[in-house]
């Protein structure tokens, strides 16, 4: 099948040919362009374009020459994962791009009179450059800017730069190797995944943000192997990166010096007095962060994964040292064995995930620090009511200490959480909400949001964050810090 046209005299045809090629990602996986003789050649080995038996579409031009070939080397593996295969000399491998990935601006008001803050402000942007110089190699460099502000009894302002995804990667036949900074988020359960232990937590805004925005990139060496419907993911963290905490004057800091409380621990009068006067040391050990393996696969309507990890937790656990009058952050190293399962049935996706931890930090009744075994588990369902665009996720999550000594920690914690997302008014608006509700103890967080989404990729939203709970819960710790927010965000 061969066509001849004068490109300079027929720009509309030029545009349509370009749209045809680049608008069909299923078969336009390998594209090669060059200039020189008056011909534009499209090789269609898959026969998608039809025409001649050799699958060749050539367009000749009296001006510049284009040699455009299309092959099908890119293959998808289990769960729609890119196998990493690519061909040298493709157009994508020659591309260089630099762009603003996202921008986010938000203003908030703390409406509780007991909150130490009156108003809040947040600004974020992420900029990245991506380059694939030769063959199967590619590189990416990203940087982010975050600015936090709170006004009230004590003003809090912090503006900082940080790295985002920044790596060098090689894609081979059936594998992908990456060295650099990435977010590694394993597991199947939304929001609170028991096997998601390699990722670095971000508590800069407490629990206000959705899961991807509560993670930071960390240095990794990663190998991903693909074989049909199976995948092996191996990760090593050569440098330990601790969780990102807000400044100590922020309402989201996990220690409230004014009340004498640590998030998640029930206070006693003696403990409260010690916390109010203690120094705080959040220094992390200068060591590797650990690593792990995750093997995943698909069998019919069942997706599954198994994982083994030896990892140092990024979230600090504060131990009180009476000798020095200091709260010292501990980052214990733990073995983690677990797995997750997903099943498509009855018009819904059913999920289960569990992990055993060898060393979970706890505080003895006498104030001493130790670790104990624990089991974290979660089960949930995701469905689209009436086959609509509305999405509903419901989950039950549990944490159980195993053979724990006499501790002040809660030995069993059960939480019911979920998320809903409902577009309405011709897809121009969206209602979305998250919630966490304690089952064994009153612990409430509700986050409703209404957003105008017609100006893609921009969103304008109004959201609320409501906290309430019994002593020793997250809801109680942030109970005075419920707020309303108005914001704008865009992803490009």
Image: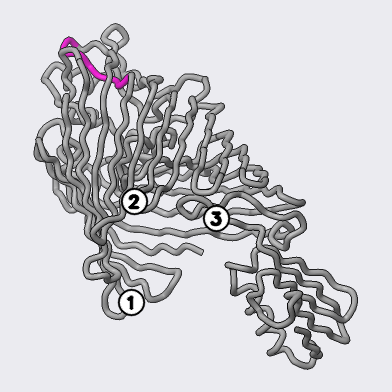
Name the residue furthest top: 323
The residue where tag 1 is placed is 428
Q: Secondary structure at mark 2?
A: loop
- Residue 34 drawn above or below residue 474: below
The answer to which of 112 and 471 lies nearer the viewer is 471
Question: Principal SS element in the magenta part?
Answer: strand
Residue 22 at x, y percent in the picture: 63, 73
Residue tagged by mark 2?
A: 210
Secondary structure at numbered mark 1: loop
Q: Is tag 3's residue or tag 1's residue first in the polypeptide sequence?
A: 3
Badge 3: residue crowd in 10 Å (few <14, some 14–19, many ≥20): some
Q: Give how far across and how far down residue 156 sits, in percent.
A: 35, 42
| Image position of 28 (left or right of 443) | right
Which is nearer the N-term, disc 1 or disc 2? Answer: 2
Question: From where the camera sits, is residue 279 visible?
Answer: no
Q: What is the residue that sits farthest to the right in this orientation?
A: 37
Q: Nearer the viewer, mark 3 or mark 1?
A: 3
The reply to whether discs 1 and 2 touch (Cβ–Cβ < 8 Å) is no
**Compared with residue 85, is residue 232 higher up or lower down, i.e. above or below?**
above
**Label placed on residue 76:** 3
In magenta, the rendered stretch is 359-366
Residue at image position (31%, 55%) is 344
Residue 220 x %, y % = 55, 34
Residue 486 position, x and y percent, is 30, 62
Other residues around mark 1 within 10 Å, as few (<14) / some (14–19) / many (≥20): few
Answer with left or right where residue 339 lies relative to residue 117. Answer: right
Q: Name the residue at 45% across, 69% down.
A: 457
- What separation in Å lies between label 3 and label 2 (alpha carbons)? 28 Å
């Amino acid at each position: 099948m061969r066509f001849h046209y004068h490109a300079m005299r027929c720009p509309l045809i030029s545009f349509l040919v370009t749209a045809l090629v680049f608008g069909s990602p299923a078969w336009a996986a390998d594209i090669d362009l060059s200039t020189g003789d008056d011909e534009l050649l499209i090789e269609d080995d898959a026969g998608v374009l039809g025409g001649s038996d050799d699958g060749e579409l050539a367009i000749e031009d009296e001006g510049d020459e284009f040699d455009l070939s299309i092959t099908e080397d890119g293959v998808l593996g289990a769960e729609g994962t890119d196998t990493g295969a690519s061909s040298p000399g493709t157009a994508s491998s020659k591309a260089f791009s630099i762009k603003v990935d996202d921008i986010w601006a938000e203003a908030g008001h703390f409406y509780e009179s007991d909150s130490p803050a009156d108003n809040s402000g947040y600004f974020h942007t992420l900029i990245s450059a991506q380059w694939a110089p030769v063959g199967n190699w590619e590189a990416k460099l990203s940087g982010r800017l975050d600015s936090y502000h709170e006004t009230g009894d004590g003003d809090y302002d912090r503006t900082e730069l940080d790295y985002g995804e920044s790596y060098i990667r090689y894609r081979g036949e059936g594998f992908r190797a990456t060295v650099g900074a990435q977010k590694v988020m394993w597991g199947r359960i939304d929001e609170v995944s028991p096997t998601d232990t390699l990722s670095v937590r971000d508590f800069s805004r407490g629990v206000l943000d959705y899961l991807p925005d509560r993670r930071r990139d960390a240095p990794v060496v990663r190998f991903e192997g693909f074989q049909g419907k199976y995948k092996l993911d191996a990760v090593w963290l050569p440098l330990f990166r601790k969780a990102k905490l807000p400044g100590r004057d922020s309402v989201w800091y996990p220690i409230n010096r004014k009340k004498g409380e640590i998030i998640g621990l029930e206070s006693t009068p003696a403990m409260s007095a010690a916390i109010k006067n203690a120094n705080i040391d959040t220094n992390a050990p200068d060591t590797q962060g650990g690593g792990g393996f995750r093997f995943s696969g698909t069998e019919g309507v069942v997706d599954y994964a198994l994982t083994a990890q030896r990892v140092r937790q990024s979230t600090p656990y504060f131990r009180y040292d009476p000798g020095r009058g200091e709260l010292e952050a501990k980052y214990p190293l733990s073995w983690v064995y677990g797995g997750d399962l997903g099943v498509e049935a009855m018009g819904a996706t059913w999920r289960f995930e569990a992990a055993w931890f060898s060393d979970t930090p706890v505080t003895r009744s006498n104030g001493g620090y130790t670790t104990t075994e624990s089991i974290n588990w979660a089960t949930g369902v995701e469905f689209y009511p009436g086959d609509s665009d509305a999405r509903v996720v419901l989950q039950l999550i549990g944490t159980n200490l195993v053979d724990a000594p006499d501790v002040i920690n809660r030995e069993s914690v059960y939480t019911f959480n979920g998320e809903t997302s409902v577009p309405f008014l011709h897809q121009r608006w969206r209602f979305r909400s998250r919630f966490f509700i304690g089952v064994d103890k009153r612990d409430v967080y509700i986050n409703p949001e209404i957003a105008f989404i017609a100006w893609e990729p921009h969103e304008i939203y109004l959201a609320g964050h409501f906290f309430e709970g019994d002593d020793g819960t997250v809801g109680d710790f942030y109970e005075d810090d419920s707020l309303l927010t108005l914001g704008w965000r865009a992803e490009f």
